[in-house]
């Protein structure tokens, strides 16, 4: 699955859940997205829920911002780095970011970073429109991969 396809599919799932919860205020909505609640209420929201596994090593994980507003990607590649194609990166250069490299590609690894799951970040960037918060993530918006259509 490409980054763009995951992004679109996740945005749809997020919007559907939030749409059902219009009666909740901001704090109630954020509380609803607690990992322990979401894995039961919406087991299809994340593939890790089936394994009772968290994507980040945090005692209390909030899944409202599954993905990060600072993650940048382009399925065609952002740029070349040492003869490899860089497909994703962190726009704030988080000290906890990692890198996954293959012979031909470089991808950002966010698994050690907890930025989008911290309470003050949830409050700062909160919007019921996940796509609005993540609007700068997809650097390749103008040119989708033809094999990525659904």
Image: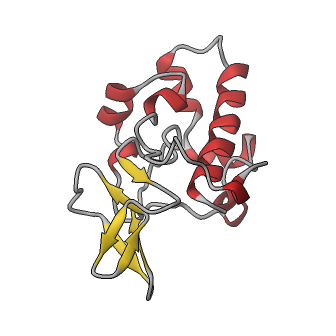
Q: Provide residue 94's location: percent of width, then percent of height.
A: 24, 56
Left-right relation of 142 to 20: left
* Residue nearer the viewer, 50 or 77: 77
Identify the residue at horizontal 47%, vertical 45% (top origin). 138
Q: Quadrant of residue 102?
A: bottom left
* Residue nearer the viewer, 122 or 80: 80
Q: As drawn, which residue projects farthest toward the bottom?
A: 103
Identify the residue at horizontal 55%, vertical 40% (top origin). 34
Identify the residue at horizontal 44%, vertical 54% (top origin). 73
Q: Quadrant of the N terminus?
A: bottom right
Instruction: Give the vertical position of 93 relative to 128 (above or below).
Output: below
Instruction: Give the vertical position of 84 relative to 26 (above or below).
Output: below
Q: Provide residue 46's location: percent of width, then percent of height.
A: 66, 53
* Residue nearer the viewer, 106 or 92: 106
Identify the residue at horizontal 40%, vertical 38% (top origin). 136
Q: Provide residue 133's location: percent of width, then percent of height.
A: 44, 30
Left-right relation of 43 to 141: right
Left-right relation of 30 to 111: right
Q: Quadrant of residue 70?
A: top left
Q: As drawn, which residue projects farthest toward the right?
A: 150
Q: Provide residue 118's location: percent of width, then percent of height.
A: 34, 42
């Amino acid at each position: 699955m490409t980054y763009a396809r995951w992004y679109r599919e996740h945005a749809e799932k997020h919007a559907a859940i939030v749409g059902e919860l219009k009666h909740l205020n901001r704090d109630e909505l954020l509380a609803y997205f607690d990992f322990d609640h979401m894995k039961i209420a919406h087991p299809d929201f994340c593939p890790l829920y089936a394994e009772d596994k968290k994507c980040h090593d945090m005692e209390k994980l909030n899944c409202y911002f599954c993905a990060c507003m600072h993650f940048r990607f382009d399925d065609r590649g952002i740029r070349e780095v040492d003869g490899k194609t860089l497909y994703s990166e962190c726009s704030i250069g988080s000290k906890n970011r990692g890198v996954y490299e293959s012979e031909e590609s470089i991808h950002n690894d966010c698994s050690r970073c907890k930025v989008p799951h911290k309470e003050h970040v949830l409050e700062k960037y909160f919007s019921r429109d996940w796509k609005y918060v993540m609007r700068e993530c997809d650097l390749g918006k103008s040119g989708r991969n033809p094999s990525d259509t659904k």
